[in-house]
Structures are given as structure tokens and as C-alpha cells.
Image (cartoon, grey):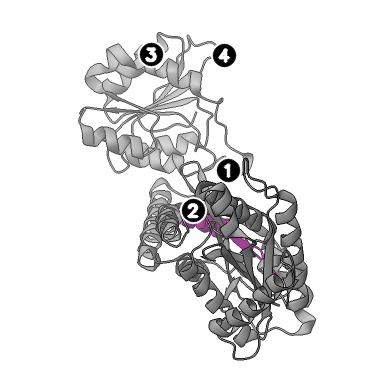
């Protein structure tokens, strides 16, 4: 052991394999009292008189447990605890704090400094040995330092300053993350706010935010490197290829066709978790750069801090979804489907991408209600809704348009693809929709229309409606385009 001021030698009575305990107290009488109690139990005990000495000693010897006074000179027991917890060599070292006061604030401060247990000095005689045994039994083993870190990397006070600076940074980051609550009106706004903050703090070439929700997860991307809006590039960033056009891209760098195989580089994922529920994730992609450990720590902290905000956003969104949902079928109502179709038409106008709609109507539905009753009619509608949901893709939108009519919005789909979808839906309904004590056969007629330049919702639906009635006039259970 180092020749430290005020240090006491180890007990010569301890067995060679006895647990090694360091006692820290600026009172010689207190050190002697605690050391004597521990030595009588056969422990190997060393003692120092200050937090600074204890910090240095932990890098020169291997210890199984630290027993430290809370109130000392320049470096208190709480500060010593924080130092040891923030160093990778000593972060798992069990620490027992002793204090002259047993008040709520002292217990709270000691616990949040990272101490494993806490004893008031007037209870040492009764509680010390049992507490030490419990902590040693729960410890993973003697904490040793790596050879290259056999001495502290800096003085205790310098290291304390570094730890305080790091904790201050974390506190500011947490405050900034919590301020994102102001941008929590929607998944899109929150994702963009997270990306802006993550982009300010890291140099990752690509940052992706995924937030789960209905009808599908949302994806937002901050790109500092070339980005091509193609399925291959989108998939390389962990985004499903069917979301190629739906992903929200901000700050995208200029890209050319030669950039279609850009390097994604290192990838790190930081789940956004509330309780036991995963709400999404933040992903960093290094590109041609390395993602540093400090950037990974930032990603982890940011994901943890935004979890409660994301939870609130998703709850609000779910409340809105319920307000936008047909209570009978569980599909979206007419207003919500109209809003989504309007968004797709705006996207089609901006990018020139196709979009189609399929207007479906249950054949002879009035006869079903008249012959089997409205309860059976409602069950037919529910079964139809289930079949539609099972048939559409994750990027499609389906809703009850009114009565026995359903509207399906098909983004990124031209007329040929829309006909294929509609035929598949028609066949699925005929094959699978069965209701106990209901009609032996349920079918649908479907009218399709595809976006044309400067189309409005009304024009598209009117053309689909004309096709629908043409399908009914030609025998029902068919698709017309």
C-alpha cells in the first residue's frame, strides 16, 4: 500500500483471501472504530483520512468494498462516490456511506450519488457488519484496475472537475431534450425536433428517428451525406423499402446518380423505451466517419429523455385516431381518409408519383339487412373491414366511406397495380368473408380511379363511383377501372 498520510496498516490477522475493505474518514477515532469492527470479523482493512487519498488508493490496490464518511474535507464522501462511479475501473465497486445525520436529504443525496447503502454513525455498532456482509455477497467480485490505468489519469480534484463538467453537460442535454415537449403536437414535428438536436450534438452522416404508431411507424431522416430516395438506399438505413416516399427527409445533401451506393458505415441504435414498451428508436450512421463513444452516449441519453414525450405524443395521436375511426368497423372514418388522400394528392403533384383509389361496395347489402337482420349486416361490415386490412399494404389507407362503402387509398400505385390489388381484394372477400347464420356468400364490387394532373379528391372519387356502378350494372362481384 502507498505511504499515505494518516493511513492505517492492514490487519495481520486477516486471511490471505479475506475481502479487502478500504475505510475513509477524516476522524482518527472513527477510522479506528470502524476498522476494529471489520478486523474482528476477519476482513483485510486499510484506512485513509481523506477522499483524495481514497481515490488514489483505489487505483493502486484492489478493493472489495469502500466504507466512507460523508462529510470530510476538500473531497466529500458523496463526491468520492460520484468519482468512483464515473470511472470505468471502479464503477462497480460497492460503496457504503456513513454519516452523522440520518435525515431524508442525506439519504436521498447518498443514494443518488451512487452509494450501495447508507448507515448513520450512531447505528454503526448494530448495522455495520450485517450491511458489509450483504454488500459483499451481492458484489460481482474484487474490483481491479487495468494495467494501463494503475494510477489515476488525473488528480482527484481535476477528475472531480471533469465529472462535474460531464454531469452538467448531461443536465443541459436533458433540459434541451425535455424542451422538445414544445414540438410534441405530432410524430412528424417531434421527429424533426429530435433530429435537429441530435444533429447539433453529433457528426453522424445519417440520423434516423423511428416512432411507432398507427397505421404504420413514421420515419424521419437527417442526412449530411448524399441521399437517394430509392428503396436500396432507404433499406440500408433500416427503413422498410415500402416507406421510400413516406420518409420525412430534412437537410439532405446534394446527390447524384453516382451516389446511389454511398457508404452507410457504422450503425448504432438507441431504443426509445417507456416502461417496458418500445416506442421507436434513434439510429446513428457514421458514413465515412467513426461514431465516437461520446456520440453514442449522447444518443442513449437523448433516447431516454425523449421517451416520456414520445409516449405523450403517441397517446394524443391514438386519441385522435379513435376520433377518426369508425366505431363499428375499426377502420378510419370518411373525414380521416379524405385528409390522407389529400396529402397523397399533394405528394403526387410535388413528385409526379402515381396514386390510385379503390371504392368498394358490398353487393346486395340491403337484402342482407332485410333477410338476416341488422346485427348480421353489421357483422358482415366488420368482416369486410378485417379482410380489407389484411389485404392492404402498410403504406395504404383504408376507411369506411359511408354505409356499406369502403375507400382504399393506394400511394405509389398506378392503374395497373390498382387493378391487381382490387382483384386480390375481391377474391379475398369472396373466399374468406363468412358470417355465422348470415348469407352463404358475400361479394364486393370495386371501382378504381388513378390520379391525373391537377385532380381533386372530388374528381377522383366521382370517377371511382362511376366505375363502381358500372361494375354493379355488369353483374357485381367485379372490378372496373
219 shown above or below 39: below
- Secondary structure beneath dot 1 equals helix
Q: Quadrant of residue 107?
A: top left
User: Where are the magenta residues, as a range?
Assistant: 283-302
Q: Which tag, 1 or 4, sits closer to the chain's start?
A: 4
| Mark toward the viewer: 1 or 2 | 2
Residue extending furthest toward the front: 371
Residue extending furthest toward the bottom: 454
Of the pair 203 and 260, the residue shown nearer to us: 260
Q: Which tag, 4 or 2, sits closer to the chain's start?
A: 4
| Mark toward the viewer: 4 or 2 | 2
Residue 82 falls inside the magenta stretch: no
Of the pair 382 and 211, the residue shown nearer to us: 382
Query: Is 205 left, or right, of 12 in this rendering?
Result: right
Question: Mark 4–mark 2 contact, CB under 8 Å?
Answer: no
Residue count near mark 1 (Cα–Cα under 10 Å), binned few <14, some 14–19, many ≥20? few
Determine which residue is flagged by label 1: 149
Residue count near mark 4 (Cα–Cα under 10 Å), binned few <14, some 14–19, many ≥20? few
Q: Which tag, 1 or 2, sits closer to the chain's start?
A: 1
Determine which residue is flagged by label 3: 130
Determine which residue is flagged by label 2: 328
| Mark toward the viewer: 1 or 3 | 3
Residue count near mark 2 (Cα–Cα under 10 Å), binned few <14, some 14–19, many ≥20? few
Amino acid at each position: 500500500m502507498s505511504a499515505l498520510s494518516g493511513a492505517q496498516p492492514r490487519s495481520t490477522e486477516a486471511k490471505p483471501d479475506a475481502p479487502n475493505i478500504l475505510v475513509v474518514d477524516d476522524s482518527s477515532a472513527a477510522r479506528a472504530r470502524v476498522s476494529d469492527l471489520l478486523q474482528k470479523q476477519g476482513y483485510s482493512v486499510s484506512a485513509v483520512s481523506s477522499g483524495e487519498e481514497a481515490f488514489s488508493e483505489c487505483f493502486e490496490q484492489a478493493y472489495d468494498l469502500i466504507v466512507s464518511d460523508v462529510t470530510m474535507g476538500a473531497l466529500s464522501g458523496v463526491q468520492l462516490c460520484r468519482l468512483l462511479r464515473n470511472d470505468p475501473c471502479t464503477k462497480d465497486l460497492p460503496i457504503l456511506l456513513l454519516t452523522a445525520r440520518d435525515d431524508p436529504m442525506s439519504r436521498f443525496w447518498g443514494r443518488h450519488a451512487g452509494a450501495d447503502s447508507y448507515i448513520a454513525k450512531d447505528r454503526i455498532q448494530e448495522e455495520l457488519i450485517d450491511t458489509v456482509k450483504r454488500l459483499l455477497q451481492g458484489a460481482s467480485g474484487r474490483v481491479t484496475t487495468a494495467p494501463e490505468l494503475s494510477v489515476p489519469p488525473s488528480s482527484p480534484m481535476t477528475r472531480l472537475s471533469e465529472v462535474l463538467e460531464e454531469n452538467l453537460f448531461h443536465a443541459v442535454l436533458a433540459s434541451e431534450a425535455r424542451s422538445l415537449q414544445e414540438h410534441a403536437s405530432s410524430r412528424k414535428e417531434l421527429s424533426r425536433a429530435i433530429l435537429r438536436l441530435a444533429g447539433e450534438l453529433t457528426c453522424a452522416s445519417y440520423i434516423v428517428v423511428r416512432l411507432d404508431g398507427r397505421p404504420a411507424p413514421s420515419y424521419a431522416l437527417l442526412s449530411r451525406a448524399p441521399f437517394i430516395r430509392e428503396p436500396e438506399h432507404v433499406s440500408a438505413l433500416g427503413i422498410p423499402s415500402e416507406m421510400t416516399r413516406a420518409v420525412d427527409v430534412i437537410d439532405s445533401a446534394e446527390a447524384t446518380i453516382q451516389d446511389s451506393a454511398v457508404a452507410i458505415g457504422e450503425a448504432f441504435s438507441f431504443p426509445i423505451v417507456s416502461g417496458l414498451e418500445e416506442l421507436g428508436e434513434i439510429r446513428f450512421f457514421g458514413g465515412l466517419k467513426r461514431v465516437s463513444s461520446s456520440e453514442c452516449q449522447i444518443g442513449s441519453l437523448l433516447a431516454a429523455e425523449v421517451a416520456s414525450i414520445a409516449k405523450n405524443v403517441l397517446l394524443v395521436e391514438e386519441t385522435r385516431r379513435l376520433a377518426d375511426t369508425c366505431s363499428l368497423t375499426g377502420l378510419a372514418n370518411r373525414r380521416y381518409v379524405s385528409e390522407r388522400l389529400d396529402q397523397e394528392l399533394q405528394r403526387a403533384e410535388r413528385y409526379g408519383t402515381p396514386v390510385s383509389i379503390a371504392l368498394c361496395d358490398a353487393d346486395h347489402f340491403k337484402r342482407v339487412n332485410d333477410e338476416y337482420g341488422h346485427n348480421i349486416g353489421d357483422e358482415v361490415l366488420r368482416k369486410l373491414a378485417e379482410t380489407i386490412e389484411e389485404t392492404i399494404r402498410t403504406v395504404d389507407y383504408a376507411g369506411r366511406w359511408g354505409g356499406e362503402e369502403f375507400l382504399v387509398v393506394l400511394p405509389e400505385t398506378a392503374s395497373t397495380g390498382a387493378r391487381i390489388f382490387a382483384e386480390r381484394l375481391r377474391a379475398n372477400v369472396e373466399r374468406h368473408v363468412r358470417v355465422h347464420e348470415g348469407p352463404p356468400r358475400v361479394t364486393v364490387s370495386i371501382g378504381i380511379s388513378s390520379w391525373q394532373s391537377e385532380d381533386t379528391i372530388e374528381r377522383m372519387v366521382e370517377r371511382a363511383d362511376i366505375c363502381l356502378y358500372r361494375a354493379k350494372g355488369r353483374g357485381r362481384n367485379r372490378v372496373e377501372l
